[in-house]
Amino acid sequence: MEEAASGKVSYRFEWSWKCRDRPQRDACISAGQRHRSLVVDEHHDVLQAQRGEMKTDAFTSLMKRRAAIEGTISELVRGHGLRQARYRGLRKVALQNWLTGAACNGKRWLRLLAWEMEVVPA
């Protein structure tokens, strides 16, 4: 089945259950339902392969690294205005990014020093 507007292709599978007297019927079909249907799009096998890959240890370790950097990027964007460049030109924008990162690291370092001074009395 192909949608005319978007060109999206999907496959629809329908089957009726003629197992009225079987005990498994309640697990498959609810009381008011006469048949089951399943709709998958053309990329279903790719999606299933990706879901299988998500269960591997390599993917988990990669996502841990991503989760760690996401917080830093969020801090730079929200707290330091890194979403929008103040200057024109790649070199000036790169310099802005480097200085913003250095300022963020400096603030983190000062927070660490302040925390260590509170935790460890002199």
Image (cartoon, helix red, strand yellow):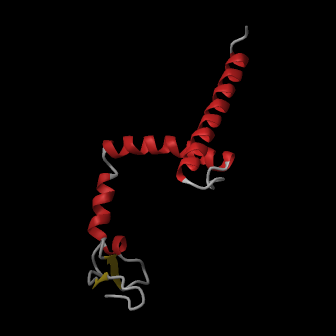
Residue 104 drawn at (x, y percent): 63, 36
- At 53% from the left and 52% from the top, the residue drawn is 90
Residue 13 percent coordinates (x, y)? 28, 82
State the residue at coordinates (33%, 78%): 38
Q: Looking at the rendering, in which quadrant would you find the N terminus?
A: bottom left
Left or right: residue 106 versus residue 70 is: right
- Above or below, comparing residue 50 to residue 9 in the picture: above
108 or 7: nearer the eye?
108
Q: Which residue shows up at 33% across the image and 88% down it?
A: 2
> What residue is shown at x 68% (from left), y 28% (from top)?
111
Name above or below for residue 100 compared with residue 89: above
Specify whether 6 is left or right of 106: left
Residue 117's quadrant in the figure? Answer: top right
Choose between 4 and 80: the one closer to the eye: 80
> Residue pushed farthest bottom?
4
Q: Position of residue 70 (x, y in %)?
A: 53, 46
Q: Quadrant of the C terminus?
A: top right
Front-most of 121 and 75? 75
Quarter of the figure with residue 46: bottom left
Examine the rendered structure and indicate whether residue 110 appears above or below residue 83.
above
- Judging depth in this view, the residue of 19 and 38 nearest the camera is 38
Residue 39 in percent (x, y) is at: 34, 79
Q: Is residue 86 above or below residue 66?
A: below
Q: Is residue 72 left or right of residue 80?
A: left
